[in-house]
Image (cartoon, rainbow, N blue to C red):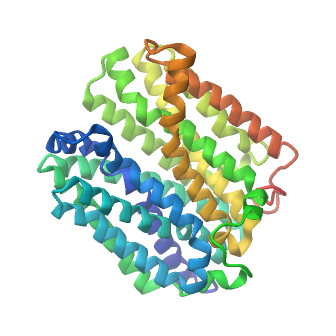
Amino acid sequence: MTNNTVSKRVTATILSMSLLTVMAGAAIAPALGIIKAHFAGAPAMLVQLIVSIPALLIIITNLFFLPLSRVLRTRAIATTGLLLYVVAGAGCFFVDDLYLLLAMRALLGVSVGLIMPLSTGLLAYYFPPEEQARLMGLSAAMNQMGGVVATLLAGLLATISWNDAFLVYLLGLTALVMVWLWLPDEQLGSANKRGVPFQPRQLLKFHPSVVGMLLLMTIFFIFPTNFAIVASQQQGLSTGVITAVMVGLDVVAFFVGLGFGSLMNRFRRSVKYFAPLLFLLGYAAYLVPTVAMAVVGSAMIGMANGVGVPYLNTIASIKGGKNSATTVMPLLSAALYLGQFVSPLIVMPLSKTLFGPADIVAPYKVGIMLCLLFLFQVWSTRHFQSLPPSQGASSEHAA
């Protein structure tokens, strides 16, 4: 962009979409207990799907993003996604049937599947490589801030009524107005010769980042699915303190994202190892049954997530170039939500099999094992590569 004012508006519009994507599941998590009580006669698994079902639809929608981008321009895709986000998200306020509620949550997943690739891919489309580390860091920071705002607002609204928590999705209206006013209308799919939903060659080309994102999210989601249970039973922490620690993790990740561009410049040869090592130290700290180590471990998990997501997005966007929004970013988005979905399905059975059902910190031990696998994956795919000093971001041969 040659006009600085336009550039700032475009950046703000794209970042406003980043603010919303994490809210697909996280926004309702604080209200899940109240929702479960309201639908007391329903199977517990159906209630849990309220949080997890959007992730499945996000993955499916991401895989069809390329052919969709050949039919619709960016403003149409963003407008459709954001309208559906507001209607399907806030529309649950008017629903009192569990199955209809799940259908609305599935539509919310479709909406995020449309928004997510744009929230990162457009940064690669509009801005040069030397700016992308800073912008991907800002995108990740906005994502974390969205988690903080959504968790606090939904928790507050849930104290009024269980369905009031869904009104938090009205925040999508702000991004919708910004898209109408400032988002340029591009045809992202026009540069791609094929419009098939999924191309295996794209996965082969970008497999280090895609597999890395899958591992990163699988490891990270050990925290939100286990921390409250372990901290209350092992350290005797109250619900209020547990909530504060979990929100604090998002705040730590937010500030790491803000400084990610400088971090990439300063540690260009070693930054690739930060996320797996910080995850490793974080879950190791949880094995020490003290409140102080629980707080230290949570801070390290937040730092790992804050540096890992923008790192993978940055190097993948530079590898994908201006076509990132229709090639690698949908794959990264699918891997991100697939990691969230499969994490408990992988970690809990392994925990019980390897360490027994009585070991309350067994999920953290499995997390340490996965961290070692993540560390090996990073080393084996990136150990010959470093960030070129002229760009402050990676132009690695394998994204």
Please name whichever residue, 362 or 353, is drawn nearer the observer in this view of the structure: 353
Outermost residue, left side: 160
Give the side of residue 103 with respect to residue 223, left or right. left
176 displayed left or right of 5: left
> For the image shown, how many numbered marks are present on the structure?
0
Q: Residue 314: x, y in percent?
A: 67, 59
Closest to the observer, 283 or 362: 362
Can residue 146 be spotted in the picture? Answer: no
Q: Residue at x 64, y 86 (%)?
A: 2
At horizontal 42% and vertical 73% (from top left) the residue drawn is 81
Q: Give the answer, above or below, for where 79 lies relative to 303.
A: below
Q: Is residue 125 depicted above or below 212 in this figure?
A: below
Quadrant including the N terminus: bottom right
The quadrant of the rendering that contains the C terminus is bottom right
Please provide percent x and percent y for residue 132: 66, 64
Q: Answer above or below: position of 354 versus 180.
A: above
The quadrant where residue 376 appears: top right
The residue located at (54%, 49%) in the rendering is: 338
Residue 43 in the image, given as x and y percentages of width and height: 26, 39
Nearer-the-camera pick, 33 or 293: 33
Residue at 67% across, 64% down: 328
Q: Is residue 135 left or right of residue 179?
A: right
Which percent across, then down, holds residue 274? Answer: 67, 38
Residue 341 visible? The answer is yes
158 lies left or right of 199: left
